[in-house]
Image (spheres, grey):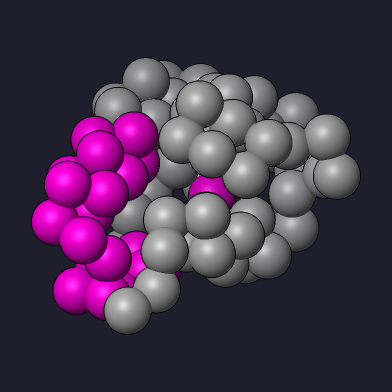
Amino acid sequence: MTDLKATIAELYARLAVPDWASPNLDGLADVLRDLSWRPEGEVTLELPDLRALPMDDAVRLMRVLVTAEVETADGPRPVRLTA
């Protein structure tokens, strides 16, 4: 079983997130709201394997990811989640 911090680090690697990002759910939410280091356009993010996380962590992580998708939908760098 993996942990939430490792899963967030995996997501950060996929997005080439700057070093300032905190490896926790609040940090992930901040990163996904401010993707200014990336060029404008859709930001596709493949979901990690949530089965490897404890259920509570998986639910909390999905809440952050879905919120980011909704909040960025009309912005210059909309987050799109894929399976």
Which residue occupies 23% across, 53% down? 58
- Horizontal placement of 31 versus 36: left or right? left
Which residue occupies 44% across, 42% down? 79
Which residue occupies 64% across, 25% down? 34
Q: Quadrant of the N terminus?
A: bottom left
Of residues 73 and 29, the one drawn nearer to the viewer in this rendering: 29
Quick check: is 1 in the magenta stretch?
A: no
Q: Is residue 23 above or below residue 54?
A: above
Indicate the position of residue 50 as horizontal and vertical percent values: 25, 67
- How many marks on residues? 0
Q: Is residue 78 visible?
A: no
> Which image quadrant is residue 4 in?
bottom left
Quick check: is 57 in the magenta stretch?
A: yes
Of residues 64 and 77, the one drawn nearer to the viewer in this rendering: 64
- Horizontal placement of 8 versus 53: left or right? right
Indicate the position of residue 36 as horizontal and vertical percent values: 75, 29
Which residue occupies 34% across, 64% down? 47
Q: Is residue 31 visible?
A: yes
Indicate the position of residue 20 as horizontal and vertical percent values: 83, 35
Q: Is residue 49 above or below residue 28?
A: below
Indicate the position of residue 5 as horizontal and vertical percent values: 52, 55
> Which image quadrant is residue 51 in?
bottom left
Q: Is residue 16 above or below residue 23?
A: below
Name the dominant secondary structure of the magenta segment.
helix
Part of the protein shown in magenta: 43-65
